[in-house]
Amino acid sequence: MIVIPAIDLKEGRCVRLEQGLMEKDTVYNDDPGAQARSWQEQGGELLHIVDLDGAFAGVPRNRDAIRAIVEAVSIPTELGGGIRDLQTIEAYLDLGIDRVILGTVAKENPGLVREACRRFPGHVVVGIDARDGMVAVRGWADVTEKLATELAREMEGFGVEAIIYTDIARDGMMGGPNLEATRALAESISIPVIASGGVSCLDDIARLMTIERYGVTGVITGKALYTGSLDLRKAVALTKSKA
C-alpha cells in the first residue's frame, strides 16, 4: 500500500474542505509547487491533485497551479476536477499529468470513460465519491440513486486503471476511514482501489493495511498531513515495514 498526499486547489492555493463544502475551506499553502516538492521530499510516491473550482464549474480552473506542481516534482501525479471531455484529458496528459481522474462523467457520460480508456490506456482512473453508499457527483453537490459498487463494476469493464473511493461524510473530518464500505467496494471488483477520506493518524493507515489483501492498494490523505496529526515520513515507513 502507498500513502498518497493530496493537494486540493482553490483559486490557485492549497486548501482542504470539510465534507466537500466549498465554504468550509482552510488555506494551507499559497504555493502549490512548493507544497508538492515538500510531499515528494517526505517520501510521497504519487501526488493526488484536485481542481476544486473545476469540479464545481465543470471546466478546468487551476491550470497554472497544476503546471507548477508538475514542474516541481519528479514523482507521478494524478488529477481530478472538472475533467468532462477528451480534449481536457489530452491537454492534461500533454501537460505532464500521469493519470486523470474522471468522476461526474463516470455516472453521467459513461461512454466518455470507455472512449478515454481506449484512447489513453493506463492513464484513466475513476473517482467514486459516495454518501451512504450512493454515488455523489458535481463536486459532491448532488447525491444520485446509483450504488457505488454498481458503478465500480461498470468502470472496471471499461478498462480503468483504478477506483478512488471517497466516503464524503468522512472527508476532511479526520474521524477515520470507512473500512467496511471500502472493503465492500474492493471486493466487488478486481482492479485496485485507493481509499480516501477520514485518515487522521498512523493507526488509520495501519487499519487500512488490514484490508490491503482485498485490493486496497493506496490511501489518499490531505488534512491530516497539513495539520501535522499524520507524519508522511512515518506513514510511508509503516507501509514499507509490512511490505
Image (tube, grey):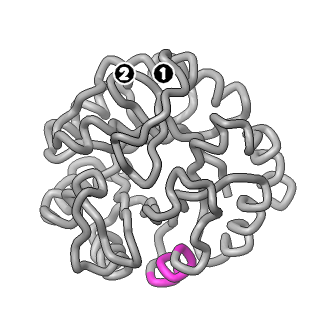
Dividing the picture into quadrants, the one containing residue 242 is bottom right
Which residue type carries mark 1? Answer: Pro
Q: Residues within 10 Å of mark 2 (few under 14, many from 20)?
A: many
Tell which of 86 and 13 is nearer to you.
13
C-alpha separation, residue under disc 2 versus residue under disc 1:
8 Å
Q: Residue at x 28, y 51 (%)?
A: 139
Q: How many marks?
A: 2
Q: Is 210 in the magenta?
A: no
First reached walking from the N terminus: tag 2 or tag 1: 2
Dividing the picture into quadrants, the one containing residue 56 is top left
Question: Which residue is denoted by mark 1 in the rendering?
Answer: 32
Which residue type carries mark 2? Answer: Gly
CB-based contact (under 8 Å), mark 2 and mark 1: yes
Quadrant of the image containing the N terminus? bottom right
Q: Residues within 10 Å of mark 1 (few under 14, many from 20)?
A: many
Q: Residue at x 56, y 54 (%)?
A: 173
Residue at the extreme front of the image, as rendered: 23
Q: Is 183 in the magenta?
A: yes
Looking at the image, is 36 positioned above or below residue 22?
A: above
- Image coordinates of residue 198 in percent, x first then y, are 58, 58
Dividing the picture into quadrants, the one containing residue 164 is bottom left
Q: Dominant secondary structure of the magenta stretch? A: helix
Question: Which residue is denoted by mark 2 in the rendering?
Answer: 12
Q: Secondary structure at mark 2?
A: loop
Q: Residue at x 25, y 57 (%)?
A: 141
Residue at the extreme right of the image, as rendered: 241
Please indicate whether residue 45 sits to the left or right of residue 27 in the image: right
Please indicate whether residue 216 sits to the left or right of residue 242 in the image: left
- The magenta-colored residue range is 182-188
Quadrant of the image containing the C terminus? bottom right
